[in-house]
Image (spheres, helix red, strand yellow):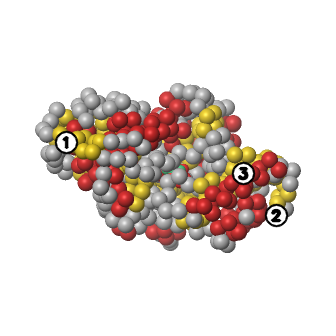
Amino acid sequence: MTSRTVQTSPIEGQKPGTSGLRKKTAVFREPSYLENFVQCIFDGTGGAAGKTYVVGGDGRFFNAEAIGVIIRMAAANGAARLIVGQGGILSTPAASNLIRKYKTDGGIILSASHNPGGENGDFGIKFNAPNGGPAPEKITDAIFARTREITEYRITEEEAADIGRIGTSVLGACRIDVIDPVTDYEALMQELFDFDAIGSLFERGFRICFDAMHAVTGPYATRILEETLGAAKGSVINAVPLPDFGGGHPDPNPVWASELVVIMEGARAPDFGAASDGDGDRNMIMGKGAFVSPSDSLALLTAYAHLAPAYSGKLTGVARSMPTSRAVDLVAERLGIPCFETPTGWKFFGNLLDAGKVTLCGEESAGTGSDHIREKDGLWAALLWLNILARDGRDIVQLRADHWRSFGRNYYSRHDYEEIPTQDAEKLMTTLRNRLPDLPGTTVAGMQITTADDFAYRDPVDDSLTEAQGVRIAFGDGSRVVMRLSGTGTQGATLRVYLERFVGRSGDHAQDLQTALAPVIAAAETVADITKHTGRSSADVIT
Ligand code: VG1
Ligand code: CO
């Protein structure tokens, strides 16, 4: 094997965001862009010499090419072994599982998750730590620091053997194992869930629709749901991963997964619907004609997880990201287990999971997961739901209605204002932040503000402090508004406005969502002057 050392210089803006480095695909294809960042991953984590990494991605445009580069760079940097998904395919949860199962030194995952793909779409790369989770900030900070001082990278002259075929090969001293992407993941799901109960549910004629959105979950869902568990053929739709996700936006919410919504609202709707995102870590759950909000889904899964073998009597605690609705808090309280509130992004759950402080966690953005891995897991969420439905017997809509009757309903919605000029978005946030001390006690749009702050998180395990994680404004009637700027976009800024209103046990749980939230929406607009700062009279995407 011949390795080359290539001279390079720092490239601006290689700062990882909420979940890795995300840019336009064209940016990643610029000379040295990918190579610089990959070298900085190695350099920022003590070098690759003698190490083992998992490598895979969501199959989007440039995935295979980027993996070819990463393999050559890992070999040139002295890595001992790489575990690569066949064809370069690994869902984010499957990669997390492999990192843990084979006790590797981490993994490199290629994905821009729910962002559209293709030549004109987005691309991304992230490093996961040996615990299987997204690198915590002290690692991403070290990687970013390297991007500002890099002078050279190393790469082999030779290409690796074809990753389209399962088997073992070598590139110099580096062993490359190309494995089936689904096998280990399926074995893990089998350990967690009552496959017999789910299988007999399907035998009794229970119908499902799983929309893989032409993204990475297709092969996983087809194998597990249809082939192993016996769901009817065709239960998984858009099952073939495509480099541009079929031109779609692989974000499982009622706006982008509209094909599933139409099916689930149709006359012959299946009993259960689910969708997952580009890299398979998100989930959207539906019953007949009913979208289950991710925040409600987390609360319901917490309340009924004991029906799955892995979680029966095992819930130590739960965690949710700060903007996620507080529905799960009520369940935790009744179960007598702690509920942690963390900043947005899965990396903040890692320490809590490693320390055994929480078993389940989730985010309002359709991410749910457990201590089985260190990433959120879309198909896992669908399987946990199916396990619960198989053992409980009620249908999903009834289950949710009973839950609201028992706990009250947290009406919840997120309003996104996309591609705002960055300066305007930052001005909105700064102006709002400056006003925070004066807000408590005042009334906006008829709503009385009780508290207002900028969320800061002290990690209970390593005591690290993460500040400026989003403005929280609470109102006298228990409602809440949260505002923050997205950390995953690649163009301009996205303002996320999270709206929540609680209606108690005996209240009306059947109101139209946006109507129920109207007073909170008006208060958010008034307190932050959204129209003035953004020039928009309404949000671009409402979920
Ligand atoms: C978004 C979501 C956040 C999620 C992140 C990564 O981040 O809000 O909850 O963890 O995406 O998800 P932001 O900073 O844009 O709000 V994924 O499926 O991209 O790995
Ligand atoms: Co994702």
Provide residue 524's location: percent of width, then percent of height.
73, 60
Question: Residue at point 32% right, 32% down?
Answer: 47
The residue beneath circle 1 is 4
Of the residues under marks 1 and 3, which one precedes in the sequence? 1
Mark 1 C-beta to ligand 1 under 8 Å: no
Q: Can see residue 507?
A: yes
Q: Amino acid at mark 3?
A: Arg
Provide residue 367's location: percent of width, then percent of height.
51, 49
- Is mark 2 in CB contact (under 8 Å) with mark 3? no
Q: Amino acid at mark 1?
A: Arg
Distance between the Cα atoms at labels 1 and 3? 50 Å
| Quadrant housing residue 139 | top left
Q: Amino acid at mark 2?
A: Ala
**Quadrant of the frame with the C terminus:** bottom right
- Is mark 1 in CB contact (under 8 Å) with mark 3? no
The dot on residue 445 is 2
Q: Can see residue 498?
A: no
Question: Residue at point 49% right, 34% down?
Answer: 138
Of the residues under marks 1 and 2, which one precedes in the sequence? 1
Front label number (1 vs 3): 1
Residue 510 appears left or right of 223 = right
The dot on residue 248 is none
The residue beneath circle 3 is 433
Distance between the Cα atoms at labels 1 and 2? 64 Å
